[in-house]
Amino acid sequence: MRELVIDLDAVVHNFKLMQSRTKALILPVIKANAYGHGMVEVAKALEAAGCTGFGVADVSEALELRDAGISAAVLAWLHDPEDDFVEAVARDVDLGIANIEQLNRAVRASEISGELAHLHLKIDTGLGRNGSTEAEWIDLIEATKAAVAAERVVVVGIFSHLSSTSEADDRAQVERFRAALAQAKDAGLEYELAHLTASDGSLAYEDAHFDMIRVGIAIYGLDPFSSHRSSEFGLRPAMTAKSVVAQVKRVPAGHGVSYGYLHTTETETTLALVPVGYAEGLPRNATGKAHVSINGKSYPILSRIAMDQFVLDVGNDNVKAGDEVILFGDPAVGAPSVDDLADASDTINYEIVTRMGGRFKRRYIGAAK
Ligand SMILES: *Cc1c(COP(=O)(O)O)cnc(C)c1O
């Protein structure tokens, strides 16, 4: 009745497309259930396509990948003080390290597990989220060098993240990142991979790819700039959200439709009920602005989106119970785009796909499966 169709061929296509644009390694970011696409399925498809590492936020996400049999490198970078670094280190999860407290926990985890902790040191070059401050950076480098000498840790990478505020702000961060790398080098700290850009920076600043790029939204085929340009970049949206018409009925003119009567029928017409609501992640504030498609024709959602359902006024069109309703998908095959729904909902495509859930079932297609 409600389905998220995930095209794993599109995911692999997008991965290879990004690979073709750079000499750097690609680290697909599959946090938050792969932005709603299904973390384990996406990881398996990409691993089969030759992907050698993944990025997630939480250690628990990384461990879920290990439980599922993923053996590629996995980097987790967002930790609270309770996170279990011992299990992470024991199971070969790379840790993003933002300060000396986290470094010390990684060292302790190495002592307990008897394994080397693989680290990526994070420097805050201006985003103001996690990462070492520039003031503390040299102390973190020195403490890390001591842990390397004690054979408790290896430094796989040094990384940072752009604010995407403006090109000038991003360029300033690139320069601060270069300075942070130079400090590490001058201090004699060895590392393999410097990485800075996510999807947007990777598409916009080809001179700032360093050794690896962390690509999230582009892997799912969506435009990181919210500019409706995914097809221009050659990206293919991987998620199609669909449902079916649950019920149709003829009603007279003047019939109020759904809560608050935001829509009242103007003539005798057919109402088509679609069993998808905000419980599934369809934003309530898309009411009056979003469009969906049935039999290739686009219909506006004029009446209030409710928890479980919304209603379309389809006029005299031959819409029947059981007809397929496409909420969004690949515009190249005529589906409404995620970007349109995001615009209608006053948000970004990231939030739309990541929050798709509720009673939707995911179905995977593509040879990559
Ligand atoms: C989520 C995230 C990414 C991926 O961002 P996209 O814009 O989806 O490519 C990369 N790096 C970090 C640190 C992130 O948190």
Image (cartoon, helix red, strand yellow):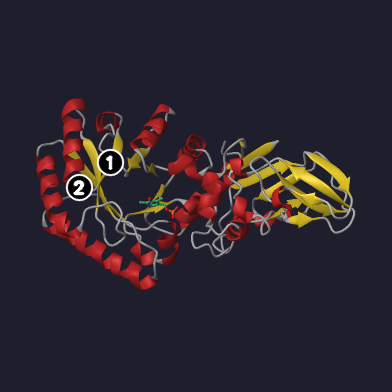
Q: Are marks 2 and 1 in contact (CB under 8 Å)?
A: no
Quadrant of the rendering where the C terminus is positioned? top right
Residue labelled with disc 2 = 99
Disc 1 element: strand
* Residue positioned 64% across, 45% down in the render: 241
Q: Which residue lies at the image location 18% right of the left edge and 61% below the top edge?
A: 182
For label 2, the crowd category at 10 Å Cα-Cα, with few meaning under 14, some 14 to 19 and many 20 or more, is many
**Which quarter of the picture shows residue 55?**
top left
Q: CA distance from mark 2 to mark 1?
A: 12 Å
**Residue 237 position within the rendered picture, expressed as x and y whole percent measured from the top left:** 59, 52
Which residue corresponds to the image point at 22% horizontal and 53% vertical from the top-left? Answer: 132
Q: Is residue 69 visible?
A: yes
Disc 1: which residue: 95
- Residue 342 lies, with reference to residue 207, above or below; the image says above
Which disc, if any, is residue 330?
none
State the SS at label 2. Answer: loop
Residue 67 vs residue 316, the one in the foreground = 316
Vertical side of 355 occupied by 113: above or below: above
Q: Is mark 1 within 8 Å of ligand 1?
A: no
In x, y percent, where is residue 31? Answer: 43, 43
Q: Position of residue 339 (x, y in %)?
A: 59, 58
